[in-house]
Amino acid sequence: MHISCRNSLVVTLLLALAPSVPVFANGETTFVRVTEDHQDRPLALQLAIASYSPRTGRDIRVDLISAIHIGDREYYAALNDRFRNYDALLYELIAPKDVVISRQESERSGIISNTQIMMKNMLQLSFQLDEIDYAASNFVHADLTPTELSQSMDDRGESLYVYFWRLFYASIDQYAKDPLGLNDIQMLSAMLSADSDNTFKILLAYEMTNLDTLQEVLGEDADSAVIGARNQRAVDVLKSQLDGGAKRVAIFFGVAHMPDMEQRLINQLDLIYLDTTWIDAWRLDTHADK
């Protein structure tokens, strides 16, 4: 497959799973990575839980919990355990206010796409909406409604048509940067050394950590409706929760949101970065226990 076509396909799939870019903020905080063993064989796609606190020393802790829409069942189980420890868990979902999240409601509203269903089955993973307990009492919706998102996109001149052409030109740009496909060769080497039948999953995992194209497709994070406007809503809800007395709060959004989200925590709430905890989202070495 021609590399530009291959990039277009992978970008489309990643947008359906969890829009992602090289997820660094200020050149320091990393939100997604692939871990490898001493022989450079991929072990797991990991997502970050990055923690922040006020400069003033107040007894407040805010965690940015990076999410992916499909993952290992054990990954979601570990998150459910962690979620019980928060005063408020702010979650993303473009849905009407007061929506009750269930698998049936998600399918009726079109939240689960055909692409996600295909990828879930192909990669033998689980849906986030199936595994996360959104009925928990500390869960707080912190996203735009469909009407608000549509209006925000209109205000910015954004549309699916615009995203399509951004994807087209971004793929051409990726080919110009790597006409010999050296990045593909590096990923192929990792897949071959993995001694695993998870080749496509490994390909996607590496793409999630190094594909610049998605930044070009989604536009500048702070100005976009898909990232910026939704992140601002989450920060506004966070402020409300902290003003209401919450001490330990988490924001559970897709990993692509996190660099911009971090900047909003720093600039608007004067928070500082503390540390990062990593959780395996996709196990890539299927022979580890053999």
Image (cartoon, rainbow, N blue to C red):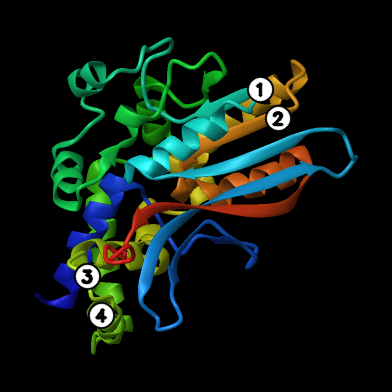
Q: Which residue is drawn at 36% across and 33% down?
A: 154
Q: Which residue is drawn at 46% across and 81% down?
A: 38
Whole-number angstrom distance, CA of label 3 to CA of label 4: 17 Å
* Quadrant for the C terminus in the image: bottom left
Q: Which amino acid does label 1 sit on?
A: Asp
Instruction: From the viewer's perspective, tell me whether residue 160 is left or right of residue 251.
Output: left
Residue where numbered disc 2 is placed? 248
The spot of residue 151 in percent (x, y) is: 39, 26
Residue where numbered disc 4 is placed? 184
Q: Of the numbered discs in the image, which one, if any, rests on residue 182?
A: none
Residue where numbered disc 1 is placed? 87
| Rendering quarter of residue 37 | bottom left
Marked residue nearer the N-terminal end (1 or 4):
1
Which SS class for mark 4?
helix
Q: Say if mark 2 contacts mark 1, CB within 8 Å.
A: yes
The spot of residue 175 in percent (x, y) is: 25, 78
Which SS class for mark 2?
strand
Q: Which amino acid does label 2 sit on?
A: Arg
Q: Say if mark 3 contacts mark 4, CB within 8 Å.
A: no
Marked residue nearer the N-terminal end (1 or 3):
1
Residue closer to the observer: 257 or 131: 131
Q: Nearer the viewer, mark 3 or mark 2?
A: 3
Whole-number angstrom distance, CA of label 1 to CA of label 3: 41 Å
Q: Is residue 211 visible?
A: no
